[in-house]
Image (cartoon, rainbow, N blue to C red):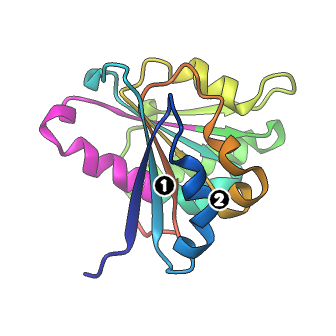
């Protein structure tokens, strides 16, 4: 199989190299690669605290790759006893639809996660998505969040900021939705 993914890393405390990536994302994206950006932290990794995957309504193209990567990571001996938790943030009017979609994926076996490891979080007007993620995943061993090229183009490196309570993070941009 040909290489189809590029992984970049930046230090979340110094953020030295992140602007280079932002400036060159269009060139990398033109190669039809899946792109991951690992935001490393000096914080100790608590492998038993699990892997947290955050899915947003605008992020479903990335969701399958984020789940696949979490299972690959969990295959490493250090992560073997960790759990994978999926959090989906949705608008209040989409809560029931979102819950049904996720439970259907679990029941058909296309998503090898137990329902107890899936949590639907309804967006509230006064809390930002980043605040919700900071609160829920502050103790996670690894937090995986998707991003879209359009957001990167519009907001720049700011999409990687604001996660002050989190340790190591993996930002994922899938070129196309993967089949599970």
Asked whether disc 1 touches disc 2, contact meaning CB atoms under 8 Å apart, the reply is no
Residue 28: x and y, percent?
A: 52, 72
Residue 116: in magenta span:
no
Let me know if residue 35 appears in the view: yes
Q: Label 1, label 2: how many angstroms apart (C-alpha)?
A: 23 Å
Which disc is residue 148 wearing?
2
Q: Secondary structure at mark 1?
A: helix
Residue 52: x and y, percent?
A: 45, 34
Residue 68: in magenta span:
yes
Pick whichever of labels 1 and 2 is earlier in the sequence: 1
Q: Nearer the viewer, residue 44 or 55?
A: 44
In the image: residue 100, left or right of residue 70: right
In the image: residue 71, left or right of residue 173: left
Label 1 neighbourhood size at 10 Å, few (<14), some (14-19), many (20+)? some
Q: Nearer the viewer, residue 15 or 52?
A: 15
Question: Which residue range is magenta in the image?
Answer: 65-87
From the image, tell me which residue sits under label 1: 105
In the image, residue 60 above or below residue 136: below
Q: Which picture quadrant has residue 92?
A: top right
Image quarter of the C terminus = bottom left
Label 2 neighbourhood size at 10 Å, few (<14), some (14-19), many (20+)? some
Let me know if residue 176 appears in the view: no
Q: Which picture quadrant has residue 154?
A: bottom right
Residue at screen point 41% across, 24% down: 140
């Amino acid at each position: 199989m040909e290489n189809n993914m590029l992984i970049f890393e930046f230090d979340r405390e110094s953020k030295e190299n992140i602007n280079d990536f932002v400036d060159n994302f269009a060139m990398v994206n033109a190669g039809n690669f899946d792109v991951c950006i690992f935001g490393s932290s000096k914080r100790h990794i608590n492998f038993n605290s699990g892997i947290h995957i955050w899915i947003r309504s605008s992020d479903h193209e990335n969701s399958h790759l984020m789940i696949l990567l979490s299972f690959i990571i969990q295959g490493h001996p250090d992560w073997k006893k960790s759990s994978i938790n999926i959090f989906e943030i949705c608008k209040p009017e989409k809560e029931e639809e979102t819950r049904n979609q996720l439970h259907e994926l679990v029941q058909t076996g296309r998503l090898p996660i137990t329902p107890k490891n899936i949590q639907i979080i309804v967006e509230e007007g006064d809390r930002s998505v980043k605040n919700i993620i900071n609160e829920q995943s502050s103790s996670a061993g690894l937090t995986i969040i998707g991003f879209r090229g359009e957001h990167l183009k519009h907001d720049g490196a700011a999409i990687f900021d604001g996660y002050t309570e989190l340790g190591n993070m993996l930002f994922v941009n899938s070129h196309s939705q993967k089949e599970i």
